[in-house]
Image (spheres, rainbow, N blue to C red):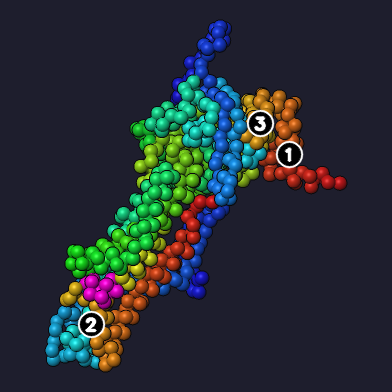
Amino acid sequence: MAEQPTSVPLATPGPQTGPANAIDVRDVTRDYRRPRTSLRHPSPPVHALRGVSFAVPQGQRFGIVGESGCGKSTLLRILAGLDRPTSGSVAIDGRDITGLRERRLKFVRERLQLVFQDPMSSLDPRMRVGDIVGEPLIAQGHGNRRERVAELLEAVGLRADAADRYPHQFSGGQRQRISIARALAPRPKIIVADEPVSALDVSVRAQVLNLIADLVDELSLTLVFVSHDLSVVRHVCDRVAVMHAGQIVETGDTEQVYEDPQHSYTRRLIAAVPTLGKALSGVSAADLNQEYRP
Amino acid sequence: MSALVTEAAVASEGPDGRRRRRPVTGSLLVGGLIVALVLGMALLSFVWTPHDPTLVNSSARLQEPSLEYWFGTDKFGRDVFSQILMGSRTTLFVGFVAVGVAAVVGVPLGIVAGMGPRWFGELLMRGNDMLLAFPALLLAIMFAAVYGASTLVAMVAIGIASIPNFARLIRGGTLQVMKTEYVIAARAAGRGPFAIGLRHVLPNVSSLVIVQASVGFAIAVLAEAALSFLGFGTPPPTPSWGRMLQESQELLSSDPRLAVFPGVAIAVAVLGFNLLGDGLRDRFDPKLEDHR
Ligand SMILES: Nc1ncnc2c1ncn2[C@@H]1O[C@H](COP(=O)(O)OP(=O)(O)OP(=O)(O)O)[C@@H](O)[C@H]1O
Ligand SMILES: [Mg+2]
């Protein structure tokens, strides 16, 4: 299927010889200007990101956790070249994409695809599923569209006749599968998933998570996986960055962060949702408190 | 709002992602029926009218309604019912031309204003506001003075004056669509702005276009009547409800029915298109569909 990243012997000396990181984020900030609410003073800007840096080597599954509003989606939009940082830089496969015009971002569109949070609003309600999944193929001028779409639908566990139907005829979990099929269509090397299961029914979360994990394995993709739930990230990712108020407060191997959190914010996150099993069965932190009440 | 709620329903999407049934409201039903009636009258006039609506018959002037002349005759002896039938054609023609001009220019303008950079959209909308401030009827009278009075000229003018209504509404819809994740997904897929406008924005604002079109239709019908009444619209001998009203003026005290028939026709048609617009607005979400 897709070509493997060329492996480099580990013994090769020197820091510059390995393949470039899939993603390099350096000191990225993003301020949102807000509309004036007063005539005399301009509203202060929202600092959605305050100096975020991290690197994702090829083939890694990198998780980002943090509570709602901490800047996760903003960060993803910037590293997908869909928004510009106020300062700092982003490189994909070693190529700086900061400030590039849309026309020069073609290689990002080919190499990096997204899966969105809300399966309702991320699929155009007026488009047939076949056209939705095939959209990156049209946009990037691939041939054999029908066959490829059928192949993709099968790969995500949908029937081929789904192509002729509209998104509203599918359940949330099925829609997220459609979204995943669209992301895989142009054979990207990097998949960026923004809370792909948080809008789903608890009963289908595990299925969709496993699908993502399996496909990432099978196609040897690099994954950036965002969630507000550390236990979900733990299920999928090797490394994790914990984000709080626009900053990364802790980075490490997932198990290590989970077993031995260094930052107090991480500890609170872990305490909030104790196990994947509970998360998947829909038990929220509030329910847990209830459960253990004497 | 819905005084009359029937069982007929069309599938549309509910928040749970499954199909939800929405009732057909009274206004949609009544509006649809009236519009269908006007359409039926226009179609009928192509194959049949009881008399030649333009035939002047000096032996049959100012006849009262009878089996021969259902709505009576006017001061030239022309059959009023036949004129009303033929006049519905003018009414529809007027609506299609005015709405067509307004939509063909206003919709792309609104989409471009909504998709372009912010300053560009604001600039277009300021120009829009200036046009909006200009009275439509005055524009039509100026056009008639320059190009001569005809239905087409009057309606192109009314159409131009209605462009801002379309542009404003469609820009609002476009701004909403541009914020959705499916547009972000299309950008991530590598779609350019032109494809996004055509494939994603246009289909998703089309319900707004339909609503505004039926309201614009009502405005155009009324404007044609007013212009014909003032002598700047449809010239004789083409039957037009507005001109029938004007011609009835001098006989208002002796033969008020000559004003009543075209007057009622205009009022009912305008009401019908307005009700249809209202009903469609209720049917499609007040805001845009599927954007939460
Ligand atoms: N277009 C925008 N204009 C102004 N402020 C914004 C905009 N987008 C995001 N913000 C603000 O930036 C901050 C980060 O938002 P972001 O959507 O990245 O958070 P998030 O971590 O993805 O949250 P969630 O888990 O709810 O998706 C929030 O305070 C938000 O209000
Ligand atoms: Mg988010």
| Circle 1 residue | A272
Residue nearest the observer in this picture, A270 or B239:
B239
| Circle 3 residue | A242
Q: Nearer the viewer, mark 2 or mark 1?
A: 2
x and y, in percent, of residue A79 in the image: 52, 31
> Ligand 1: does it lie within 8 Å of the C-beta at label 2?
no
Residue nearest the observer in this picture, B54 or A199:
B54
Q: Residues within 10 Å of mark 3 (few under 14, many from 20)?
A: many
Numbered disc 3: what chain?
Answer: A
The reply, left or right, for residue A277 in relation to residue B137 is right
User: Which of the image's four quarters has the N terminus of chain A?
Assistant: top left
x and y, in percent, of residue B75 in the image: 19, 87
> Ligand 1: does it lie within 8 Å of the C-beta at label 1?
no
Alpha carbon of mark 3 to alpha carbon of mark 2: how far? Answer: 81 Å
Q: Residues within 10 Å of mark 1 (few under 14, many from 20)?
A: some
Residue nearest the observer in this picture, A126 or A160:
A126
| Circle 2 residue | B247
Q: Are marks 3 and 2 on the same chain?
A: no
Numbered disc 1: what chain?
Answer: A
The residue shown at (54%, 24%) is: A24
The residue shown at (48%, 54%) is: B289
Secondary structure at badge 2 equals helix
**Residue positioned most to the right:** A294
Q: Nearer the viewer, mark 3 or mark 1?
A: 3
